[in-house]
Amino acid sequence: MQTMKNNAYTIAHSPDADDIFMYYAIKFGWVSSPYPLQNFALDIESLNQSCLSGEYDICAISFGLYPHICESYALLRTAMSFGNGYGPKVIKKKQTQLKRNFKVALSGKYTTNALLFLLKYPNARPVFMNFMEIQKAVLSGECDAGVLIHEEILNFSSELVVEAFLWDIWQELSGENALPLPLGGMALRRSIPLNRAINLEQILTRAIEIGLKYKKTLSQMLLQNHLVRVNENELSQYLDLYANKDSVTMSEVQKNALEKLYEIGYNARIYNRDLSKNLEKYLIPIEYEKIRNS
């Protein structure tokens, strides 16, 4: 378990551009913290798995994982990625006709995209792998199709075509056309004292606010330090999608979208508890600070 001493905390995030952007104002010293933070960068499914074993104090997760860890981690109201008319893409090779039980490359068992994809295509045979290997698996014929996530959605091989958009699958499964597509967020270990948990959430929120305020400068620093895998134009495009004003603080619409996701998962018997009507219970109770300071 990666728990630090001397009031320090571990924080894990993915190496994709939106997570890097949302955290690195802290790393670069633009946002101060009374608690030293040691960060780790891992692919999203490794992060999901690490939360199941309680490895990190604060961790980026797929929203689809959260009901499995809700007793040990609180869901944060910040550092979120939602799709709004866009999201992961189901791709295949040109001219490929997918059979009913086609083999599909997915970025992890607990990812949100895997949850929604397998509800739409229950007969598909999933193969779980690092998201950066999915294109290669489809191009080589190892898999018939794959779901591209992160920066892979921006620039993929001309030998591949889009079979379906996860946004459309989300709209079909949710029965809604006004709810954003929940993808990923952050979770914080419940054993952290409440006053510190509130403070840590505020620090992460401030990092995104500062990052967005100085987006051009921060983006250039990320590029110059080779911290992202995309070029300048792709970085700007990607951040507009997944690290934007909607990433700062969870809105009521975003909360409604999460509740709908958890309702779908519970009704499909993927989750053994229904978070759809009491999600607020699983967030950090920020009203505590108002009472304490009144």
Image: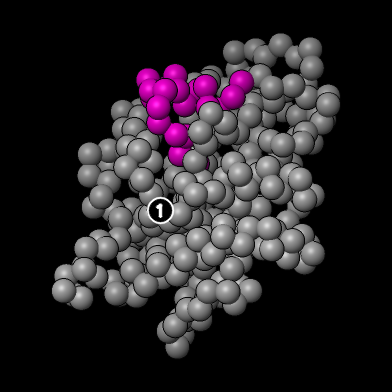
Q: Residue furthest bottom?
A: 6
Residue 230 in percent (x, y) is at 76, 49
Q: Residue at x 31, y 28 (%)?
A: 267
**Disc 1 secondary structure class:** loop
Please say if 91 is above or below 283.
above
Q: Residue at x 23, y 52 (%)?
A: 281
Please say if 261 is above or below 173.
below
Q: Residue at x 49, y 41 (%)?
A: 82
- Marker count (numbered): 1
- The residue wearing badge 1 is 249
Image color mode: one colour
Within 10 angstroms of label 1, few (less than 14), some, or many (20 or more) residues? some
Of the 4 image quadrants, the one containing the C terminus is bottom left
Please say if 251 is above or below 285.
above
Residue 238 in percent (x, y) is at 66, 44
In this picture, residue 207 sits left or right of residue 275:
right
Can residue 222 be seen in this snapshot?
no
Q: Residue at x 24, y 70 (%)?
A: 289
Which stretch is magenta? 164-184
Residue 166 colored in magenta in the image: yes
Q: Nearer the viewer, residue 239 or 20?
A: 239
In this picture, residue 150 sits left or right of residue 176:
right
Can residue 66 be seen in this snapshot?
yes
In this picture, residue 147 sits left or right of residue 206:
right
Residue 200 in percent (x, y) is at 41, 70
Three-letter code for the amino acid on which mark 1 is drawn:
Thr
Please say if 94 is above or below 118.
above
Residue 265 colored in magenta in the image: no
